[in-house]
Amino acid sequence: MPSPLSSLLPLADSLPAEEGARDCALTSLVRRLANAASLPPEAAALTLRLARSDLLNLYSGFALGAFASVLTRFRPRRFPPVAQARLHDRLRTLLTLPPARAEALSWLGAALQGELTALLRERLSQARSLPRRLAAGALGVVNLLPAESDRTPEYEFALALLRLLLESADFTLPDPEFTALLAAVEDWVGAFPYFPEGRLRDLFLALHGLELTPPQRQALRERLLAWRDLERYPPYRSFPNRRAYLRSLRRALGWSGPLASLTEWAGRVLNPGPVHPEPPDEETARRHRSLRLSTLIPGLALLARQDESAFPPLFEAFTELLRQYLLSLQLGGSVECEWALLDLLPAALAHPCWLERLAQTLETFRFYRLSENAPRELAERAPRLTPSALATLLDLRRRFPKHEWILQTLEGCAAPDPFADLERADRPRWRLTRSDAGLTPAAQDSLQERLASSLDPEPVEAALRLLSHPDPSRAPLADALALTLTRRLQEGMPLPAEWVAELARNDEALRRVLLRLSASLSAEAAPLPHDFLRHLSDALYALPALPPNKLTAACLCDPQNPLQSGLPLAQRLDEAAGLLLGRGDEAEILARLQRLLPPDPPDLALMAQLERRQDAPALRIAAAHPRLLPILVEAWPSGSQTRAGAPRRLALARALTFAAPQHVLPLLRELFYLAVELCTVWSEAGGMPRHFPEFFWEANPLAQQVLKTVVQLEPVCPQAVNLLEEIILAHYNVPEGGFNGPTFSPGVIEREILPLMVNRFVSPQAIPALVHLLQRDYPPEQRREQTISKCALQWLTNVSTLTPDQQATLWQHGYASPDLLTRALALLALGRQRPLTEQTWQTVRRLLRSSSLTLYNQRQREIARLKRQGADFFFGVPGQVFLLKGVAVALAAEWRQDPNLLTPAQRADLQDSLRQAASSFQRTLEARLTTGSHAGFGQEHSPLRALALSLCDAVHRSPDDDPDWLLHPADLAYLTSVVSERIFL
């Protein structure tokens, strides 16, 4: 009787030729094999054949520089391409099958020993003649290609394959596999001319989440303790002759082919004498010791998390590392200590009794806090906070109040899962490394009980840190915190400013505190909490998102009563609590907030107050600029760069974002004119240091915030367009030394302003004004920076009703620009017009069908021509031209989703163009040509963020993804033409 899998054999021999369809067919074939109860001989042979094919594709991707390191998940470098994600997914399924897993282990062993090329040639000798010759030639070319990083392709392939083997076995490794891995590492230690600290650190990262058996833990522990001996395993080895040294160096660097032959020849002709490393000086020896300890501590921490007996050697190594750090304080080196502590903390939290020793050790060496990014990095290590660990941390916080690392640890335990997007619906058996990590429900209940039963500061600090990341499941904890804070205030106990700042972010907890305070003040049962209310209002003014009702509540809580409400404090607090619920009419609230602006004309009584101070410079300014009189008499808090009213005015500019344009545009214009006047006065005050520096420190953020608010108003109206132009041009019109460079620089506009303009509704009346901005004759500096044009085009990307004449303006003054971002924005705006014009269709089609190398060379020639003509532009590198093709791919994806936009012929042509753009050759070519061409610095600081936000939905990307995916159009086309679901690696 034939096997049910027999029908798969013909399918494997008749896979589609087209790449995308072939990929989908292979994935379906692998899943059917994995779901089989057993594998007959013919199915096992098919599994082996598929595994070899995918393993070769994986190695080729790293060898050609088209794949990202598997450690990208833990140390972000660049976004992994979709083809790599699909291949990883298929290999995870394949590696659950014994034939494929056995083959992968042989490839892994060869790659770890630097002998993968020899294994591939052995495999090729079993193939047919023509494929064997083609593949052998390809391997020869691959070995000559320069690596994109300092790691060899074999090494990157080995790390990726090791991680895939681990994930496919539910984060375990069978004893034979683990023994082979340790043997390969021992081979590194014995064969390399130096001790492989870097490789060991990468190995521990790749083994993240591994569950070890007792024999495996014992074997790893023996090797880690042995490697601590720098005399037995020195940083650099001696060799009896130079030939042996070069052979060892060739092995460590992964040289093969011509480079291997060259080193072999050099070993024969160079001085044959022995090779000895130079004796290190004291500082170099200390660095070697620190590096060795920081390398071994992650491995010891991996053991200690699962076996408590590993803690003594772990703490011994950590103490020695801290001692080396203490010796290097004059050099400022503490990075290794922080890495080691971050690795040690999850293990100590799993065994809370060791947290006591950790605190004592850190106290001995006065190591009190980690860097600002430490909570996020700790979250990547999946710590688990149990009730016993929480109780121990609270007790340590009481006894060691200087130890800020305790609160940072709590924040790291509450941080959101950094790998939440790794889970795949079609891979339910893959357990996430952080599935049982973070704040446990039992620990949260324990903390709530502590808050209810005592007024100790430690539970309050812990709750504030644990609530620093929004999570609906922690609402009961927020309620318990509010009750405790109210009790402390009612008993006259002061709240530190840090606590108040955290409270200001939680509306419900804050509302409950204000209501209880109002009731207490009405009954005259508590002293006036002026310090608390001052800190609270300052914290509210500093919030990045502050609606008008919440700003009004902040002013009502302010002891200075800036709104001059005339109400007693108890009634003001009660009204503030009501405003936090969203009560109140918008027009009435804005009318009250207008009192935060200096009145025009000012109160003449203020002039008499200024005269009593006998401040001659201030009197001169008040006479020339009477509107600034109320600001001149404001208090200047100690340690502040600005006057007391500056935070309120800046908060007002932020709050106006949430109101209707017709209500707020006059206020915004008034705020901007105030910023210009402040900046002008400071600029005209004389040399440096000038008088009134507080005007400078207020004017720049105020002007920038007004611009941010203007671009967020909806609908976009002609008045907002005119105000935007006036604001940006003011940078060139204020006296020299006025607005500082970063306030309206191109980088600030691209990174911070353009993303705020995405998906804003534009009124039809504003469209002619926006198009007119593209035709205006601006100063030379603005013509070079093109910030106004970029803002206009970004707004126009939200419009689909441009007339033919208006589209012609975009072609002439937008797409023809030498600036690639301006050109890309114009292409996006033109591609969203309905109906689609022939010129737009042909432009996008031409970009999709153009070779990446052709576009790259065209951009090189364009840059050279413009430079010869003396064009004053910053052109960047030629590889950034792929941005245009990336926008074209995303537009094609949008067009395909509109059923009435394209004719059947156009739809077929577009699909064929996407297939052509998504070829593996184009993906590899772009990976090479865009090396060093990335325009962004992460999703928060990339000039491409606005474009990415505009297009991410069409191409199944997340808004939080690094926007540099726009510079990889071939990979984007592969995703668009082949993959319908969301992909996460």
Image (cartoon, rainbow, N blue to C red):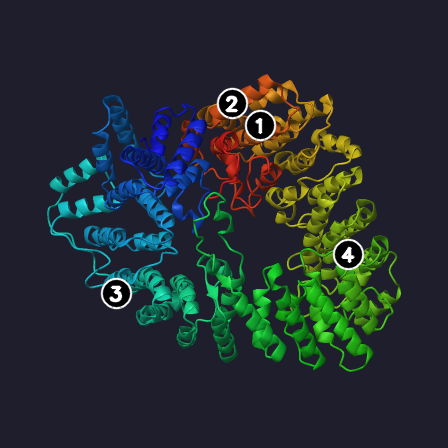
Q: Residues within 10 Å of mark 4 (few under 14, many from 20)?
A: many
Q: Quadrant of the C terminus?
A: top left
Measured from the top left, where is residue 63 in percent x and y?
Answer: 33, 36
Task: Choose between 905 and 751: the one closer to the eye.
Answer: 905
Query: What residue is pinned by disc 1?
Result: 892
Labels 3 and 1: the sequence-earlier one: 3
Q: Is residue 814 above or below residue 606?
A: above
Task: Give the Cα distance between marks 3 and 2.
Answer: 58 Å
Residue 598, visible in the rendered structure:
no
Query: What residue is pinned by disc 2?
Result: 913
Going by the numbered disc 1, the residue's amino acid type is Ala
Give me the residue at 38% from left, 62% from top: 336
Measured from the top left, where is residue 61 in percent x and y?
Answer: 37, 36
Measured from the top left, where is residue 444 in percent x and y?
Answer: 56, 68
Q: Residues within 10 Å of mark 3 (few under 14, many from 20)?
A: some
Is 67 on the left-hand or right-hand side of 912? left
Measured from the top left, where is residue 32 in percent x and y?
Answer: 40, 36
